[in-house]
Every structure is written in structure tokens, then in C-alpha cells.
Amino acid sequence: MPRLVGINHIALEVGSIDDALEFYGRIFDLELRGRSPLMAFIDMGDQFIAIAEGRTQPPDRHRHFGLVVDDMEATRHALEAAGVAIQPGRGLDFIDPWGNHVQVVDYREIQFTKAPEILRGMGLDGLTKSETALAELRAKGLASPTD
């Protein structure tokens, strides 16, 4: 059977491409990969977010997607500065203006890993994992004992 390797991209439905780029651009440093009249593609190194104009469903508070960031506190401050309500709970979750539920996690604290050359290309080559995240990776044979 085939094995899941990762996620190439996620796709979000929004009301307006311009409004979505403006909204997400107030929170994150965006690099646009490409754009068409009804879609925009935001780079995340070797992955991307596809933003599609034309929301076809009501907001769903239970379905969500997780974004990995290099700095949780900077993200929290950017959300607050943009006037975005942070959802109650332990994490850093927010709802965008189109009802997309976003969960933000810190790269250092989770087992998700980018290859060193990808991090270097993104200007994040000094980003390291916490001991807890390394222990998770070692337990699965995904990191060496010296990492």
C-alpha cells in the first residue's frame, strides 16, 4: 500500500483573494508563488497554501488546519496587532474572516521537520528543535541519537 509522505499544499476558500492576501499579510511574512484571477499561491518553502476565491460553505469551527511557524510569540503579537481574536484554549488558534479555523504551532516544539537545505533556502537555518520534539523524532527513528 502507498504511504503518506507529507502535504504538498492546503487550499482555503475565501471571499476575496485581495482581502485574503491583505489579511494574512498582516500576520505572516508572505511570499507569493503565483496568482490567477481566482487563486493565489503562498509559498511555505517546499509547500504552499492555495487561496481560492468563492467560499461555497458556511464556517466550520471543528475542521481546521495547522500552520507551522518559526516564532509563536511573534505570531501572537501579529494577530493581536491585526485585531484578530485568539480562540480560547492552550494553543494559538484563530478564525479568519471567511470562517477558516487556523491552528498555529511552533516548529521547535513539534516533530514536523524540514530538510536542512529547505530551512537554509527559507533563511531559517538556525531554527532548531526542542529536546521534547527531538525525543519524539528519535523514538520513531527519525533523528539520530546525536541530534
Image (cartoon, rainbow, N blue to C red):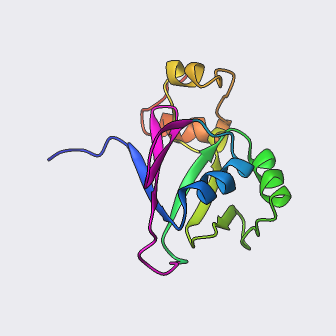
Viewer-nearest residue: 131 or 72: 72
Residue at 72% x, 50% y is 27
| Displayed quadrant of residue 129 | top right
Question: Where does the magenta region start and end?
Answer: 32-60
Determine the image quadrant of residue 38: bottom left
The image quadrant that residue 108 belongs to is top right
- Compare residues 104 and 52 and report the one nearer the observer: 52
x%, y% of residue 115?
A: 49, 25
Furthest residue toward left: 1
Judge whether residue 124 can be spotted in this image: yes
Is 49 positioned to the left or the right of 130 in the image? left
Q: Answer left or right for 11 relative to 101.
A: left
Q: Is residue 3 magenta?
A: no
Q: Residue at x 51, y 18 (%)?
A: 117
Q: Compared to 111, does 67 lie above or below?
A: below
**Residue 90: x, y in percent?**
72, 65
Instruction: Report the residue that reaches farthest toward the bottom.
Output: 58
Residue depicted at x 51% and y 24%: 118
